Image: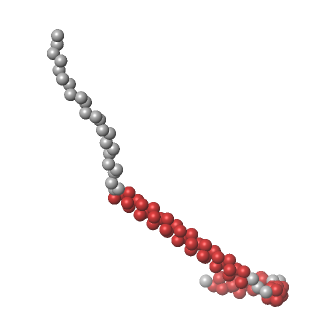
Amino acid sequence: MEPKVAVPPAAPVMMQTPPAPAPTPAKGKTMWLIAGLVIVIVLIAGIYLFQSRQQAGQSSKASPSPAAADSLQQELNSVNLEDLEQEFTGVDQDLQNL
């Protein structure tokens, strides 16, 4: 008969969770970079909207009144375009003298 050897009971196995990784400096820099980019994008969008609203307001103010439009039309009709060649002869002579 073989002698019986006393085997001690096995120790309970405890599952240990690994500690949470500490934030690395690269992650912190990345977060600041993303936050900075978001702020810059919001500023650019705000400036764009502000400028577009100002231009829209100015364009509505710049439209001439009907009386001014009539006077402009009369001036346009009074322009004489019949003798353009005669007006350009002086310019041609000046260019040939260069």
Give the percent coordinates (x, y) of residue 81: 81, 83
Give the quarter of the figure containing the N terminus: top left
Say which of 63 and 71 sits in front.
Answer: 63
Q: Is residue 5 above or below residue 1?
A: below
The quadrant where residue 77 appears: bottom right
The residue at the point 64 percent across, 79 percent down is 54
Q: How is the image coloured?
A: secondary structure
Q: Is residue 13 above or below residue 30?
A: above
The residue at the point 29 percent across, 35 percent down is 13
Give the percent coordinates (x, y) of residue 83: 81, 84
Give the quarter of the figure containing the C terminus: bottom right
Give the percent coordinates (x, y) of residue 14: 30, 38
Q: Is residue 15 above or below residue 81?
A: above
Q: Is residue 77 left or right of residue 94?
A: right
The quadrant where residue 25 appears: bottom left
Say which of 51 and 20 sits in front.
Answer: 20
The residue at the point 18 percent across, 18 percent down is 4
The residue at the point 52 percent across, 67 percent down is 41
Give the percent coordinates (x, y) of residue 29: 38, 61
Is residue 51 visible to the viewer in this orientation of the structure? yes
Q: How many marks?
A: 0
Is residue 79 visible to the viewer in this orientation of the structure? no
Q: Is residue 71 left or right of residue 27?
A: right
